[in-house]
Amino acid sequence: MTRNPVQALFDWKVRGIRWIEIIGFVCVGALVFSVYIAKAAAARESAEIGRLERDIAETGQRVRLLRAEAARLEQPGRLEVLSRGAGLAPVAATRQADEAQLTELKPAPLPVPVAPAPDAAAPLAASVSAAPTPDAVPASPPVDGAQR
């Protein structure tokens, strides 16, 4: 009588243990190990997500604080007090210019600095005369590699 090949696989024994049981234990062990690895990776990802959420919350708090500071600094009353303290005044609403008047509104050029008095220029002239002249500097040899 012929045996079924599948039945032969289930009946095949090694030292009293069937091969199918050994394969089953190996598969269960591999599944347990893969679940452990997946759980450890999920814990790492969960910790990273928590850290990122904390960073987002801290950044949101800083944004709210900076917006509040900007709102405080941009208060019209505060700016008016600062501008009056600096000697600035509001521009009259009737002051308008068209394109032809723009050249007239151009700011005046800055004054040219005045040369120092001759007494103050004497130490400067002495230091300039102490500088080496081009004749005093030794000539350097040619750089082109033809002469050596």
Image (cartoon, rainbow, N blue to C red):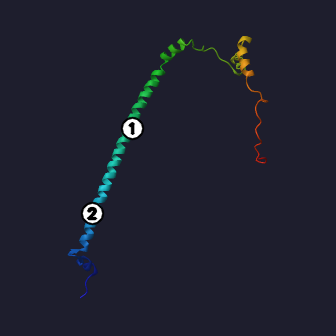
Instruction: Please state the horizontal and vertical placement of residue 147, each as a whole percent of the image.
Output: 79, 47
| Tag 1 secondary structure | helix
Is residue 69 something one can see in this rendering?
yes
Tell me the CA gap for discs 1 and 2.
Answer: 39 Å
Instruction: Please state the horizontal and vertical placement of residue 58, each as a whole percent of the image.
Output: 38, 34
> Of all residues shown, which one is farthest toward the bottom?
1
Instruction: Please state the horizontal and vertical placement of residue 50, each as a whole percent of the image.
Output: 34, 42
Judge from the rendering whether residue 68 lies leftward or rightward of residue 130; answer left or right.
left
> Of all residues shown, which one is farthest toward the left?
16
Q: Pointer 1: residues within 10 angstroms few (<14), some, or many (20+)?
A: few
Q: Where is residue 20, by image quadrant?
A: bottom left
**Which sits earlier in the primary sequence, circle 1 or circle 2?**
2
Q: Nearer the viewer, residue 45 or 97?
A: 45
- 59 w.r.t. 33: above or below: above
Disc 1 target residue: 55
Which residue is located at x 23 percent, y 78 percent? Answer: 11
Q: Pointer 2: residues within 10 angstroms few (<14), some, or many (20+)?
A: few
Is residue 113 something one can see in this rendering?
no
Q: Amino acid at mark 2?
A: Gly
Q: Nearer the viewer, mark 1 or mark 2?
A: 2
Which residue is located at x 27 percent, y 63 percent? Answer: 29
Quadrant showing the N terminus: bottom left
- 58 w.r.t. 4: above or below: above
Instruction: Please state the horizontal and vertical placement of residue 119, each as a whole percent of the image.
Output: 72, 11
| Tag 2 secondary structure | helix
Please report contact status of discs 1 and 2: CB closer than 8 Å, yes or no.
no
Label disc, if present, on residue 29 of the rendered structure:
2
- 18 w.r.t. 48: above or below: below
Q: Where is residue 69, by image quadrant?
A: top left
Q: Nearer the viewer, residue 16 or 135?
A: 135
Q: Amino acid at mark 1?
A: Asp
